[in-house]
Amino acid sequence: MTDRLTAQFAFLDEIDRLKGVLRATPIGDNSRRENSAEHSWHIALYALVLADQAGPEVRIDRVLRMLLLHDIVEIDAGDMPIHLAHDPAEQEAKELAAAERLFGLLPADQATEFRALWDEFEAAESPDAVFAKSLDRVQPVLQNHASGGGSWIDYDVTLEQIDSRVGVKVLRGAPKVWEFVRARVAPYFGTSD
């Protein structure tokens, strides 16, 4: 039991570092950049609040677990803003190595379970993962909107980019959410369509 607790607390101590990973997106009042731990907590709340927007086959308890785990790889790999030009293969390799190291800190049964949830989220094929990925994509849009443009200004983002990089993914898992969010942010870009 002591070995198990030692491993569990080693993991918990290590993932505290997620609080220091800054994202490009500011918090809603635009006073500072959001960190990845705050993002994970916020989208977990999105899942609780917006559970009625999920398909009937979606299990919110699994979505919550995915959302709490999905960004811990950023401790090693860093956050990669969706609107920043980068090498996706290089970022994926960094994230896979981070997943191996971080989940490897846990006892074997938890390492296997958590890694499987992370892999499922990344693949975005199951109903749970599709819904989780939708929430992960929509939250920064709302944060940027609330902050008066946030990282959209930094990366010269257009509504067309929002539609292609975010909207397509959100539509897969939460179509009514995307319709609402898009209508809310379109005026920022000078359109109401």
Image (tube, rainbow, N blue to C red):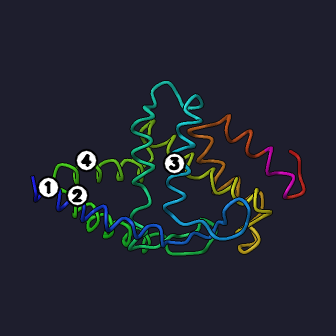
- Above-or-below relation of 125 to 38: above
Q: Which disc, if any, is residue 4?
A: 1
Q: CA distance from mark 1 to mark 4?
A: 15 Å
Looking at the rendered image, the disc whose residue lies closer to the viewer, 3 or 2, is 2
Residue at the spot 56% in from the left edge and 51% down from the top edge: 42
Q: Which residue is mark 4?
A: 113
Q: Earlier in the sequence, mark 3 or mark 1?
A: 1
Residue at the spot 63% in from the left edge and 50% down from the top edge: 138
Q: Amino acid at mark 4?
A: Glu
Whether residues under marks 2 and 1 lie with C-beta atoms below 8 angstroms apart, the answer is: yes
Looking at the rendered image, the disc whose residue lies closer to the viewer, 3 or 4, is 4
Q: Is residue 78 magenta?
A: no
Q: Which residue is mark 3?
A: 133
Q: Which disc, if any, is residue 174?
A: none
Instruction: Give the percent coordinates (x, y) of residue 157.
Output: 74, 66
Q: Earlier in the sequence, mark 3 or mark 4?
A: 4
Q: Is residue 83 left or right of residue 1?
A: right
Q: Residues within 10 Å of mark 2 (few under 14, many from 20)?
A: some
Closest to the observer, 69 or 169: 69
Instruction: Give the percent coordinates (x, y) of residue 100.
Output: 26, 65
Q: Residues within 10 Å of mark 3 (few under 14, many from 20)?
A: many
Q: CA distance from mark 2 to mark 4?
A: 13 Å
